[in-house]
Amino acid sequence: MNNPDLESSVAAGFTDAGPAKISANKVSVYYGEKKAIDEVSIDIHTRYVTAFIGPSGCGKSTFLRTLNRMNDTIPSARVDGEILLDGQDIYRSKMDVVQLRARVGMVFQKPNPFPKSIYDNIAYGPKIHGIAQSKSELDEIVEQSLRRAGLWEEVKDRLTDSGTALSGGQQQRLCIARAIAVDPEVILMDEPCSALDPIATARIEELIDELRGRYAIVIVTHSMQQAARVSQRTAFFHLGNLVEYGRTSDIFTNPRKERTKDYITGRYG
Amino acid sequence: MSPAIFVLLAIGLGLVGWLAARSRAWAFASSGEGRTRLHSLPSYHGWYVALWAFVPAIVFVAIWNVVSPQLVMQSLLADPAAAQLPDFGINRDTVLSEALAVARGSAQAVFNPLAAPLVEPAAAAMHRYGIIGIVVTLLIGFTGGVLAFLRLKPDFTARTRVERAVMLILLLASLVAILTTFGIVASLLFETIRFFGMVNPIDFLFGTHWSPDPMRDPAYANGADYGALPLFWGTIYIGAIIAMIVAIPLGLMSAIFLTQYANPTFRKWMKPILEILAGVPTVVYGYFAALTVAPFIRDVAKSLGIASASSESAIAAGLVMGVMIIPFVSSMADDSIAAVPSAMRDGSLAMGATKSETIRKVLVPAALPGIVAGVMLAVSRAIGETMIVVMAAGAAANLTANPFASMTTVTYQIVAMLTGEGSFDHPATLSAFALGMVLFVVTLGLNFIALRVVKRYREAYE
Ligand SMILES: Nc1ncnc2c1ncn2[C@@H]1O[C@H](COP(=O)(O)OP(=O)(O)O)[C@@H](O)[C@H]1O
Ligand SMILES: [Mg+2]
């Protein structure tokens, strides 16, 4: 690694965390000729919420999308370096994207429920991956997922209504429930609250905290307060580089890097 | 006096008014030494006066065109020579029109001796009313122009007024299309009612035997010969069933390929080319159906031992019609699939769905209303299609599900009845209007529903 500081911060900080769920090594992402991510290395652990912060355009979404290969849908995008999920290279091993995405789920910036019923939205993933053997098992998964997403009480009497008829915050929780339904190991969230009002945002943040115990959660956010509230680990990106990565409390109270400090104190961004 | 002269006069007046008003506006602008600023550009003053000179004059010309022949006729009948005319009917009319034609110079000599003495007074009357027309046109145009001209002032709001006039003209233009439609429907309705006066609507709509005889005495018109059910069936079978079996899957698949798989350059070329297919004259498809597809299908059917296969078959017409309709289906499906937000696609892919699962389970269902609307428009196009069925489907009104049989459609019979030997008050001829009315109502209904569906669908993604 060409960044001894970063290496030591990762090594020094997380001895308590066990082996990494996802481990990225010198990952670079190009859009055509343009380099959007420059040799980023980072370890992500289960049972922690990791926040990606940084000024907009610094590559947070781009890097997040490499973790479940959603960049494959962009023809001009190219990824270098290696990303290991439980030690298996997700770009080169026999694991294909279908299996990968079943293990690494994603929630988007704008709630994007399918124009189907609430039930069918949740049942979508389990059906595709053949998770449920019977109708009653599927019902069970749907209820379980909605419960975990804190939406069950609100929608249990109208599972056949369209998912698009819910409020914005409910839609986003529906999308989280949809991601949970295939029982992933990692959940990626790209600014999941940026389209929501403060109350709905608080609801999602609570939910993230509740989910932390079962999954590795990575959340991109442009709000430092949100990062401080929900995450235990924070990674600060700037101009395609990972500038600093460490315990959230350290990053916010005691950043090592000048650039991080400037950003945290609102000097730019 | 040819109408062209009148129109040229009105245009000339308008032009003079335009030039005069514009130079007057220039004069305002230059005389005020920078103090008086014109409210409107000089050319707007020009247009204002030009409109006032031209429009009333042209309206008069239009009215005069209708009124003056009647005035000529009146004065002709008042002439002593007209006293010898036969009293009634066709004779009287031919004599009069002969006299007028000679007077106008469009015929060389009179054929009917009675017309000869009328030529002179007819020519005189025409000349007289021609002069009157020109004078009045000039007068109206001039007065309009002068009155408008006198209103010009530096702060005259010519621009606003001209804009309003432009809007009015555009409104009238759009009314023409609508009023024409109403006119068509009204005439259709009128003839249909006449037809139903002779044939019971129940017999017509639900009867199963269609063999109108235009030679039979209309007084004995037999409702049992006017059962249009075989025609409705043929229309639906060819246009809504066989054609759609071809067009829906092919159109849908081509739309899916173009929106989801084809690279953007290919799509950019392919989509317009497909849409151009919709512009191929249907008579060309008709040739293809009659000369290539129909004989081929008959041969294949015969070799398979289907003895009833005829050289004109429902399936030949339906297949070709289906091909013709593909662009309608694919274009609408393409638009509605492309309109599904890409967040839907990403959401599905992120769940681990493959591309084809995403298409089948998310994109197509989300685009379904638009696709359905496209299909309905295609059906309404197909059942109104005439040339292909005229050339390939045949004339026999068979009520059968055998696709190799000859079948006939509503449009075919409309053509056949209207071009047949029957006179215009015979039920056989009038049945064409009733058939047209049915077709009109059905296609209108389909289009109406389709547009509603599309609108609802658009709103869902706003
Ligand atoms: N599909 C794309 N094609 C080309 N460039 C892109 C694309 N998506 C993002 N970029 C570029 O990559 C850089 C990082 O973008 P992004 O990851 O969206 O930043 P962030 O999420 O931190 O705001 C930006 O400069 C952006 O313009
Ligand atoms: Mg982003």
Image (tube, coloured by chain):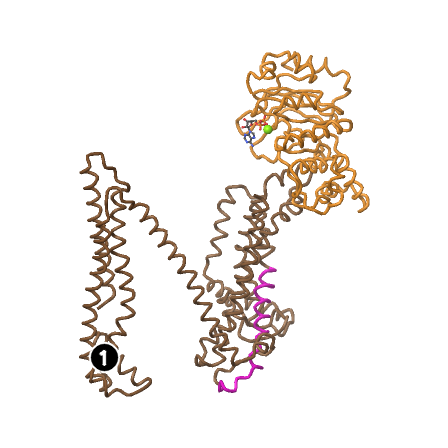
Chain colours: A orange, B brown
The quarter of the picture where residue B66 lies is bottom left
Q: Identify the image quadrant of residue A164.
A: top right
Determine the quadrant in which ligand 2 lies: top right
Query: Total number of numbered labels?
Result: 1
Q: Is residue B271 above or below residue B29?
A: below
Residue, x 70% and y 24% (percent of image)? Answer: A230
> Which is more toward the observer, A152 or B40?
B40
State yes or no: Cβ of the residue under disc 1 lies below 8 Å from any atom of ligand 1: no
Could you classify mark 1 by the number of other residues whose Cα lies within 10 Å: few (under 14), some (14-19), or many (20 or more)? many
Residue A91, can we see it?
A: no
Residue B135 is one of the magenta-drawn residues: no
Q: Tell me which secondary structure the magenta stretch mostly adopts.
A: helix
**Residue closer to the observer: B157 or A104:** B157
Chain holding disc 1? B
The residue that disc 1 covers is B76
- In this rendering, the answer to whether A176 lies above or below B437 is above
Please state if B176 lies on the left or on the right of A151 as rendered: left
Residue at image position (64%, 69%) is B304
Q: Is residue B227 visible?
A: yes
User: In the rendered structure, which segment of residues is drawn in magenta?
Assistant: B216-245
Q: Is residue B176 left or right of residue B76?
A: right
Picture layout, residue A255 above or below residue A218: above
Is B156 placed above or below A263 here?
A: below
- Residue B144 lies, in percent from the top left, at 24, 56
Residue B286 location (% of width, % of height): 49, 65
Instruction: Tell me the quarter of the image containing the C terminus of chain B.
Output: top right
For residue B224: magenta? yes
Front position in the image: B2 or B108: B2
Residue A4 screen position, x and y as percent? 65, 12
Of B331 and B373, nearer the camera is: B373
Label 1 residue SS: helix
